[in-house]
Amino acid sequence: MKLTITIQNFELPLNNPFTISRYTVTVQKTVVVSISDGNYTGYGEATVNPYYNSTIESLKASARSVKSVLEAVEENTHPTKLWKQLEPHLNDNYFALCAIDCAYWDLYAKQQQKPLRRFWSEHDENLPKTNFTIGIDSVEVMKSKIQETPWPIYKIKLGTKNDLEIIQSLREITDAVFRVDANCAWTIEETLKNAEAFKKIGVEFIEQPLKADNWEGMKILKEKSVLPIIADESCQQLKDVSICADVFHGINIKLMKCGGITPALQMIQIAKAKQLKIMVGCMTESTIGISNLTQFAPLLDYIDADGAMLLQNDIATGVTFTNGEITYADKNGSGAILI
């Protein structure tokens, strides 16, 4: 079996400027890896992200660096075996490793004539609904985004001087569930104070309030916060799950940060054993990346999969959402097809 690898980059304008506590994005740059055996093609994706030093140049260079390894893959090699072969070459660029791992899993599932999620789940019942993310902006603009997209769950990005006022104002126009993501912008005191107020107005949990390495602070929050605290920036790779179990109530797994589907499955297994709440989140991917990550939905408590909904123009078809509910493409693999 001779595999062909294609590496393409795209610029994806967003519907609106997307602001978190660290920066604003108006165009999401991304790289799509396609792996074909001549009959089937699998797709994986990794986006540019300044916080994690992910660039178009580094993603493409890293993917190109392992072409010879991929081209030499034996027929029916399991994705977990290939991941172990690739990781030593790409341990400095897990975003690129993710794109390749997802593409190969997608191809492998198509070769086996199975939807990707059937490798770890036999059913699609009681799937969690995805949230829709509202980036930081003026209260008026944040309200208008909610009104334009009625949704059962919103993730509200915070990290301003008037976070409580924002949530109170948004609550005036919707009774949807709120999830709050501070992206490392708060102190211990702010978090505890905000949690008290937020609990009274329908906030479900707080995601990553403190800086990623503030383990002592997070330990205090786990003991004292009246709302669950979910790790994101603090939980990047497999090795972080056990550490986070001591100081968080749950974790948000990002495929790009951990290196793809293969390690994400291991992270979920460990998290379940440690009785952590489990979320899988997106990084403003197209429907290529979103179709891959939603394959985990049967295993999750929460899912954040709205990335492609934030784009002006998608580059793929695949999974879709109606009022938060997941509708999988009626295809094998991830169901995603590059347009």
Image (cartoon, grey):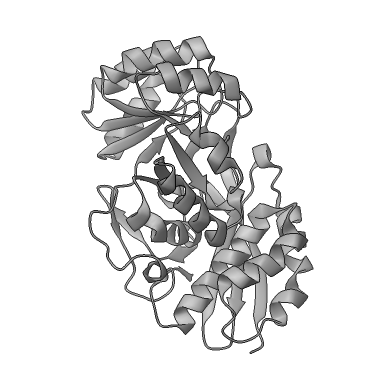
Which residue is at a point 46% across and 51% down the rendered structure image?
268
User: Where does residue 305 sit, x and y in percent of width and height?
Assistant: 41, 49
Name the one closer to the observer, 124 or 143.
124
**Where is the N terminus found, in terms of image quarters?**
bottom right
User: Where does residue 99 sit, x and y in percent of width and height?
Assistant: 60, 61
User: Where does residue 190 sit, x and y in percent of width and height?
Assistant: 47, 12
Name the one closer to the observer, 147 or 156.
156
Where is 231 relative to 327, above or below? above
Which residue is at a point 49% across and 36% down the rendered structure image?
245
Which residue is at a point 60% across and 48% down the rendered structure image?
257
User: Where does residue 22 sit, x and y in percent of width and height?
Assistant: 60, 28
Q: Classify residue 230 as left or right of residue 9.
A: left
Where is 226 relative to 329, above or below? above
Query: Residue 60 occupies which quadrant of the picture?
Result: bottom right
Query: Residue 192 occupies which quadrant of the picture?
Result: top left
Q: Classify residue 323 as left or right of residue 139.
A: left
Q: Classify residue 112 as left or right of residue 235.
A: left
Residue 298 visible (yes or no): yes
Name the one closer to the observer, 27 or 87.
87
Where is 53 relative to 102, above or below? above
Residue 14 visible (yes or no): no
